[in-house]
Image (tube, helix red, strand yellow):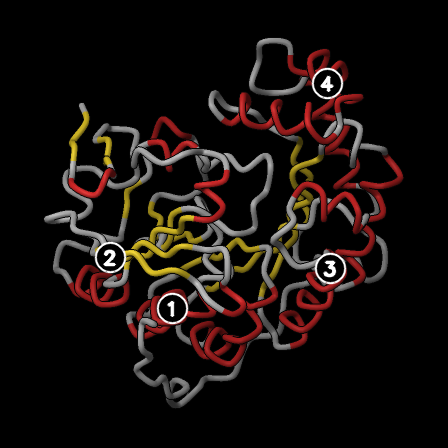
C-alpha cells in the first residue's frame, strides 16, 4: 500500500521496509539547500516515528537491528543497493538519491527514548546498512555522533560500516564507547585504483585515505575490518587488484577482510546498467555474461573471491590479531548541542 503526503513526497508502507507503520508523523518536511561544501545538495528535514528497525529474518543478514539517520547518500556510488529506498518516497533512484538527502532530525532523541524503553532487549545494532552514516551530511548534522553517544551511554553493542574518513572525527568517542560495550567498525574499500574509485563512487574519500583511517582506528585499539566491496567486473576484479587491496588492508591492521562481488537487485540493476552504458559501454557485454537474469554472479566466481580474501591470512601483519582492550574511560567526551543548520 502507499500513503500519499503533501509536498510531492510519498512513503510506501510494506513489511520489507526498514520503517513500517508511519515513519514521518504529519509528514511536513522542511527543505534546506546546501551551501559552501554542501553546495548541490538538498536536505529534507523530517521527524521519524522510530529509529531502531528490526531486520526481517528472511533477509539472512548477520544483524537483527539497524539505525539509519539519513536516506540518500552523497557518495553517489553507481551500484548502491539502497537506491530503491528513494523510490518509496516518490524520489528518483538516480540523481535524487545522490542530491536529495532525507535527514531524520530527531534521530538522537528518538534513539535515546527507544534504548530506554523497558521493551528493548539490548540487542546489537548495525549502522551503515542502508546509506553511509558518515556521509557528507553528517558533517553538518552530527546525528551519527549523537547516536554513538546514546549507544555508549546505554552500553549497547553496535557496529558501523562506512566509506568515510569522517569517522575519525569521533575517534575519542568511539574509544570511550568501546570501553562500555562491543564496538565493531568496518571500512568499505573496493579498489586501490583511484580512477576506478572516482568513476564508481565519486563522493567518497579516495581509497588511500580510507586505508590511513583504518590504521588510525586500529592504533586507537578499535576493532576495524575491511570489506573489499563491491568487486566490479572489468574494473576491479583482476586477481592481482583484489590481492593488492587485501594485502594493504592487512598491512594497515584490519581485524578481518571480506571480498564481496557486485550484486544487482531489481531497480539497482536498471540504474547501474544505464550508468555503465554511459560511462563504460565496453563492459556491458561482460556484465550481461556474468549476471544473465540473476542478481548474483556465478557461484564459482564468489568462491574464488573468498579464497583471495583468505590468502595470506597467516602472514605477519595479517590483521587477524585482536585489538588491545581499551582502557575504562571515566566519562564520555563532552558533546555540545549543535544547530541543525
Residue tagged 3: 319
Q: Secondary structure at mark 1?
A: helix
The numbered mark at residue 141 is 1
Which of disc 4 and disc 1 is earlier in sequence? 1
- 212 and 42: which one is in front? 42
Mark 3, mark 1: which one is toward the viewer?
1
CB atoms at circles 2 and 1 under 8 Å apart?
A: no
Residue tagged 2: 30
Q: CA distance from mark 3 to mark 1?
A: 33 Å
Q: Residue at x 54, y 60 (%)?
A: 185
Q: Quadrant of residue 63?
A: top left
CB atoms at circles 1 and 4 under 8 Å apart?
A: no
Q: Residue at x 41, y 59 (%)?
A: 158
Task: Say if 145 sits above or below 288 in the image.
Answer: below
Q: CA distance from mark 1 to mark 4?
A: 39 Å
Q: Residue at x 44, y 86 (%)?
A: 329
- Residue 91, how many percent across, how many down? 36, 36
Q: Quadrant of the N terminus?
A: top left
- 219 and 47: which one is in front? 47
Q: Secondary structure at mark 3?
A: loop
Mark 3, mark 2: which one is toward the viewer?
2
Q: Secondary structure at mark 2?
A: strand
- 282 and 231: which one is in front? 282
Left or right of 89? Residue 72 is right
- Residue 87, how many percent across, how many down? 36, 31
Which of disc 1 and disc 3 is earlier in sequence? 1
Q: CA distance from mark 2 to mark 1?
A: 14 Å
Q: CA distance from mark 3 to mark 2?
A: 45 Å
Residue tagged 4: 284
Structural crowding at the residue carrying mark 1, measured as other residues with C-alpha within 10 Å and reported as few (<14), some (14–19) or many (≥20): some
Amino acid at each position: 500500500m502507499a500513503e500519499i503526503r503533501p509536498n510531492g513526497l510519498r512513503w510506501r508502507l510494506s513489511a520489507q521496509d526498514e520503517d513500517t507503520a508511519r515513519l514521518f508523523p504529519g509528514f511536513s518536511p522542511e527543505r534546506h539547500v546546501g551551501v559552501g561544501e554542501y553546495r548541490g545538495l538538498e536536505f529534507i528535514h523530517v521527524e521519524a516515528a522510530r529509529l531502531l528497525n528490526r531486520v526481517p529474518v528472511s533477509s539472512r543478514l548477520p544483524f537483527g537491528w539497524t539505525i539509519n539517520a539519513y536516506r540518500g547518500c552523497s557518495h553517489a556510488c553507481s551500484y548502491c543497493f539502497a537506491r530503491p529506498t528513494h523510490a518509496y518516497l516518490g524520489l528518483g533512484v538516480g540523481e535524487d538519491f545522490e542530491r536529495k538527502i532525507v535527514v531524520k532530525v530527531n534521530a538522537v532523541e528518538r534513539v535515546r527514548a527507544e534504548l530506554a524503553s523497558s521493551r528493548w532487549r539490548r540487542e546489537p545494532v548495525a549502522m551503515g546498512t542502508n546509506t553511509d552514516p558518515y556521509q557528507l551530511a553528517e558533517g553538518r548534522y552530527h546525528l551519527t555522533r549523537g547516536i554513538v553517544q546514546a549507544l555508549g551511554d546505554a552500553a549497547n553493542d553496535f557496529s558501523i560500516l562506512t566509506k568515510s574518513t569522517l569517522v575519525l572525527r569521533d575517534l575519542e568517542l568511539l574509544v570511550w564507547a568501546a570501553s562500555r560495550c562491543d564496538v565493531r567498525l568496518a571500512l568499505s574499500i573496493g579498489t586501490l585504483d583511484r580512477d576506478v574509485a572516482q568513476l564508481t563512487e565519486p563522493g567518497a574519500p579516495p581509497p588511500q585515505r580510507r586505508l590511513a583511517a583504518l590504521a588510525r582506528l586500529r592504533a586507537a585499539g578499535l576493532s576495524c575490518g575491511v570489506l573489499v566491496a563491491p568487486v566490479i567486473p572489468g574494473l576491479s576484479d583482476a586477481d592481482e587488484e583484489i590481492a593488492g587491496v587485501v594485502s594493504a588492508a592487512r598491512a594497515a591492521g584490519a581485524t578481518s577482510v571480506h571480498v564481496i562481488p557486485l550484486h544487482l537487485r531489481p531497480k539497482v540493476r536498471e540504474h547501474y546498467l544505464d550508468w555503465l552504458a554511459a560511462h563504460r559501454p565496453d563492459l556491458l557485454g561482460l556484465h550481461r555474461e556474468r549476471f544473465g537474469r540473476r542478481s548474483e554472479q556465478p557461484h564459482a566466481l564468489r568462491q574464488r573471491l573468498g579464497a583471495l580474501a583468505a590468502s595470506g591470512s597467516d602472514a605477519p601483519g595479517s590483521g587477524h590479531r585482536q585489538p588491545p582492550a581499551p582502557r575504562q574511560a571515566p566519562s564520555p567526551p563532552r558533546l555540545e548541542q549543535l544547530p541543525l543548520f
